Amino acid sequence: MERRRFIVKAGGALVAAGAAVAVEAPNVIAQPKIQWRMPTSWTPALDILLGGARRFAEAVEQMSGGRMKIQVYAAGELIPAFGVWDAISQGTVECYNSASYYWAGKEPATQWFTTVPFGLNAQGTNAWLFYGGGLKLWEETYAPFNMIPRPSGSTGVQMGGWFRKKINSLSDYKGLKMRIPGLGGKVVAKAGGTVVLTPGGEIYTALERGVIDASEWVGPYDDMKLGLHQTARYYYYPGWHEPGTTGEFVFSRKAFESLPADIKHMVEAATVYAGQTTLFEYEAKNGTALNELRTKFKSRVDILPFPIDLLHALKKLAHEVNEEEAAKSPIARKVNESYTTFQKYSPTRSCRAR
Ligand code: CA
């Protein structure tokens, strides 16, 4: 009895029988899949960030009818939180989800794509990235590393962070050991603080044990998920250092370029979908969490604004830091110029301490 036969071409498409490679029909019902692995820098408690990565993966799988499957990993499951950049460059994985300002040591320009102290909010950052040349510069920055970046969604404006002692003036930063990344971290260092870069999943222990005196993460929802409200009394706002923090999906150029054209479009669309819904989820959940801090934890948490004079002083330092960091590489200079010019004319500029 003759069984129906199919041919599998190199790209995985089925054609009529009669050529070199033939397989039995039952074997081709499950189509060949493109399998990618996506480590992230997010500990499992960070369910909005990790959820964004999973929404991205699910969208690609569903749009492609199962032709492409991306396995998402929390920090440490496959790769340590800050090992994801090297994992792509070494060819261990095809993509990752993290934040570009963690890679300042690789290239100073990476810092601008996450957020800039006293810079643009989520709306303004998206405007710069998608319609103001920001994403093109981001691609240019990552091109020498054979990586392709896409924004993975904004957290919205962040909170200023958790402090064991009150911060009244710039001099209170002297000797303060704080977890704070990116350009904002360099501002705190310039103010006399000692800056450490701790992955999200390790902040609670560091703050609780007094290894650090202060830490910022994101905002009420995430911060409570990490337990930070149980480690320090003073919760300051606004997050002058991170007014519109945007994450990144990063693809290995080789892996991305080997995708069929239609799946490339699905991957592109899924990044925007997952990115936008991440911002919406933060906006929705931060309000509820902030209210919980104000009521349920009223006796142990003080929610305070940074003094306006302090914000003025920090803004001055932030300007100096931007100029210093921009001078470190030709692409950083170009990115800073683009961002600064865009912000100057943006209707959505935020966090202006005048
Ligand atoms: Ca942060």
Image (cartoon, helix red, strand yellow):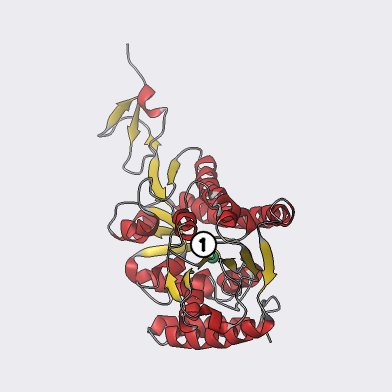
**Which percent across, then down, holds residue 80?**
36, 53
Q: Residue at x 54, y 84 (%)?
A: 171
**Which percent across, then down, holds residue 110?**
44, 72
What residue is disc 1 on? 247
Find residue 202 and report its image quarter: bottom left
One can see residue 70 in this view: yes
Q: Nearer the viewer, residue 192 or 98?
A: 192
Q: Nearer the viewer, residue 128 or 234?
A: 234
Q: Is residue 169 above or below residue 36?
A: below
Q: Residue furthest top?
A: 1
**Which percent across, then down, holds residue 206?**
45, 59
Q: Residue at x 69, y 75 (%)?
A: 348
Decide if ligand 1 comes within 8 Å of the CB at mark 1.
no
Q: Is residue 164 above or below residue 134?
A: above
Find residue 234 and report its image quarter: bottom right
Report the quarter where the C terminus lies: bottom right
Q: Secondary structure at mark 1?
A: strand
Q: Residue at x 60, y 77 (%)?
A: 119
The amino acid type, in three-letter code, at marker 1 is Gly
**Which percent across, then down, holds residue 303?**
68, 65
Q: Nearer the viewer, residue 11 or 105?
A: 105
